[in-house]
Image (tube, rainbow, N blue to C red):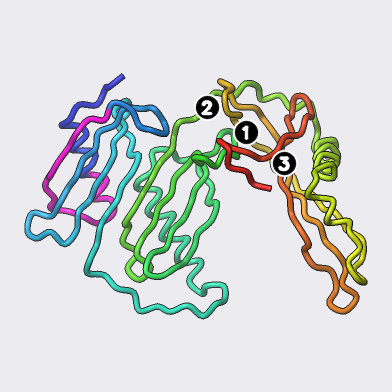
Amino acid sequence: MVKVDSDRAIQLGTRAAANVGLKDLQVTAFTLVDNDAESGCPYWSVALGPKNQRKATCRTRIDARNGHLLWLDIGIWDQHSTYTDNGKRHPDQTRVEDIAWKAIRKLAAEPNLRLLRAAPAKPQSSAEFDLLVDGKRFFNFNPRLGYTVSFDFASGQVQWFTANEVRPTIASQSAAVNKADAKQNAEKWIQKQPQFARCKQVMGDLGPPKLTTELEDGYFKFGKETKARRVWLATSKVYRQDPRNGPFLFSSYHCLVDQASGEAFPYKDREAVIE
């Protein structure tokens, strides 16, 4: 249902642009889109440009139901970064994370967020944030529930923003399967997968495989199901021992364990798979 009219949408789009440092803008185009291809929600597309000269064009999408900013994109032609890569962990990692948090606090409608990753890069850096429910994230990744923001590496100017706030209903918060049992179920499932067989193959003087597993508590909505389940995300790593160089990571696997039944599933979302 559309509850936000065009005037309000333009006001919100202009405010979003101001939040990333773009002021004195005029509306160049706006239209109502009945339903978004991914979320199915109606939104206003609002395009803005400077009144004096067109150095930048800012395009926004405003949720027509609640006025939340869903997407923001800025095209900039006159900014250049002088930074170069050295192939190591970037010395400006903390700076990039701080810029991302500052931007997301101005643009995101939801306050309960966790930084998933921030990537210093030239000329454009980016960061992804998970939206949390009771301190836990959704493991769906196609699309991810949360926000993405990108910005110019040198100046910190926000260039692009996307939001996915369509939060599935959670079937149950109960956790009948504890962490220890979930780990055992995950490792049993992983060791039955055909691709795990190569981890056990005799390869010269390499030692036998050693499996380690870490679990994260969260939610996942399976394909055609109407509600999300509470699950454990299992990340398993297989190490083998090289007699000359010590242990090394040989392979890694992911699966989901239902916290109600203990059943393990492949980590798959809309035909995209993380192994």
Identify the residue at horizontal 76%, vertical 58% (top origin): 251
Q: Which mark is residue 255?
A: 3
Q: Which mark is residue 168?
A: 2
Q: Quadrant of residue 35?
A: top left
For marks 3 and 2, the one nearer the N-term is 2
CA–CA distance between discs 3 and 1? 13 Å
- Helix or strand or loop: what does disc 3 sit on? strand
Identify the residue at horizontal 32%, vertical 68% (top origin): 155
Question: Hey, what amino acid is under mark 2?
Answer: Pro
Q: Is residue 85 above or below residue 26?
A: below
Label 2 Cα crowd, 10 Å radius (few <14 / some 14-19 / many 20+) = some
Q: Position of residue 94 (x, y in %)?
A: 50, 66
Does the CB distance between marks 1 and 2 fall below 8 Å? yes
Q: Is residue 13 above or below residue 7?
A: below
- Helix or strand or loop: what does disc 1 sit on? strand
CA–CA distance between discs 3 and 2? 20 Å
* Image depth: mark 3 or mark 1 in front: 3
Label 1 Cα crowd, 10 Å radius (few <14 / some 14-19 / many 20+) = many
For marks 3 and 1, the one nearer the N-term is 1
Residue 216 in the figure: left or right of residue 182: left
Identify the residue at horizontal 78%, vertical 62% (top origin): 250
- Helix or strand or loop: what does disc 2 sit on? loop
Which span of residues is magenta-colored?
A: 15-33
Q: Position of residue 81 (x, y in %)?
A: 34, 74
- The stretch drawn in magenta includes residue 26: yes
- The stretch drawn in magenta includes residue 110: no
Residue 74 in the figure: left or right of residue 220: left
The residue singled out by tag 1 in the image is: 219
Question: Hey, what amino acid is under mark 3?
Answer: Cys
